[in-house]
Amino acid sequence: MSGLTVVNGLGRYPRTRPRRLRVAAWSRDLVAETHLSVNDLVWPVFVIEGEGQREPVDSMPGVERLSIDLLVEAVGEAKALGVKAIDLFPRVEPHLKTPDGREATNPDNLVSRATRALKAAHPDVGIFCDVALDPYNSDGHDGIVKDGVILNDETISVLIKQSLVFAAAGCDVISPSDMMDGRVGQIRDALDAAGFGHVQIMAYAAKYASAFYGPFRDAIGTDAALKGDKKTYQMNPANTDEALREVAMDLDEGADSVMVKPGMPYLDIVQRVRETFAVPTLVYQVSGEYAMIKAAVNNGWLDNDRAVLESLLAFKRAGANAIFTYAAVEAARLLRDG
Ligand code: PBG
């Protein structure tokens, strides 16, 4: 028998001891199967109008909405820590929200202006732009609403224009988070036809109708506006085969990478998607996950640094290639300081 036990004067004891590898830090590091690096992180940021404007998001301790000038500074600091990509979300002025979400396609909207300013200051920082109508739509939905129904194909024609506007502003990765059917292929065709063949598409392929988006809707000011829920377009949290079908469709339509969202409650989906398709699989640690950790930390119930890093490492273990997290900058600092 290979023998887990051997007899000595103390009685029977194990011959094979997993703990041997764990005794010293050098040994634990040597046999670590997963590594978290600053290269894995994308920082989602909230942009607002004005100059010198900085507003804390109450439900997301440590997160602020910044005007473009301060955002440019903050991204510079993040870059100095090694954060190489950001994801832009606007809090659109209420008077610009309309039922058709037309501000989404304004070449001078907040996201377009922020993208131009960021690209001018930090050309080497990757910019993801969220494509969906919720920040611009007076109903708070990702698509156009008519008689209580979210219209799929009519929405896509607006998303195409929004994508072209963002690409023209210098966006590197068009990121449709709207969950309309068929939008990836149509956006790809439009980008290619307009000379934006180099612009990537990151598809929110498996995006669930989740309770964990609450603080985000507070941050971009859509929580009050939102009529009803998003269950007719975002996925049912009960489903996993359906996530594979969504990913297969988006890849077939030309997505360069795919997103699973939320993250922590959906690690099984991350693992299945990565194993099934072996394509760049991104995961989003969403606002509610961030808020949950910070709330426990602020109550003295969790150790911030350990909880933050462990939550991010778990995404890597599940198979994620990159992680969107509001904790990107603090995680970069923690990784730098060892
Ligand atoms: C909507 C969008 C949402 C998030 C990113 N894009 C929210 C929603 O679907 O209501 C959520 C991100 C987060 O919670 O951090 N286009």
Image: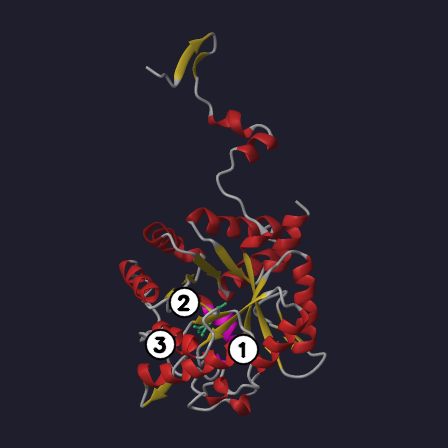
Which residue is located at x 42 percent, y 90 percent?
A: 100
Mark 1 CB near ligand 1 (8 Å cut): no
Which residue is located at x 56 percent, y 85 percent?
A: 109
Q: Marks 3 and 1, Cα distance to the nearest angstrom? A: 27 Å
Residue stretch in magenta? 213-223
Query: Is 69 situated left or right of 159 in this image?
Result: right
Queried whether the magenta region covers residue 214, the answer comes back as: yes
Q: Position of residue 83 (x, y in %)?
A: 61, 59
Q: Position of residue 90 (x, y in %)?
A: 55, 78
Which residue is located at x 61 percent, y 67 percent?
A: 63
Q: Marks 2 and 3, Cα distance to the nearest angstrom? A: 12 Å
How many discs appear? 3
Q: Main secondary structure of the magenta part?
A: helix
Which label's residue is closer to the chain start, 3 or 1?
A: 3
Q: In the rendered image, which residue does mark 2 sit on?
A: 203
Which residue is located at x 31 percent, y 82 percent?
A: 153
Single out the mark in the foreground, 2 or 1: 2
SS assignment at label 1: loop
Which label's residue is closer to the chain start, 2 or 1?
A: 2
SS assignment at label 2: strand
Mark 1 crowd level (few <14, some 14–19, many ≥20, 10 Å Cα): many
Quarter of the picture containing the N terminus is top left
Q: In the rendered image, which residue does mark 1 sit on?
A: 220
Mark 2 crowd level (few <14, some 14–19, many ≥20, 10 Å Cα): many
Q: Position of residue 317 (x, y in %)?
A: 45, 46
The reply to whether dot 3 and dot 1 touch (C-beta < 8 Å) is no
SS assignment at label 3: helix
Image position of 105 with respect to 10: above or below:
below
The reply to whether dot 2 and dot 3 touch (C-beta < 8 Å) is no
Q: In the image shown, does 48 or 222 lie closer to the viewer?
A: 48
Q: In the image shown, does 135 or 156 lie closer to the viewer?
A: 156
Q: In the rendered image, which residue does mark 3 sit on?
A: 186
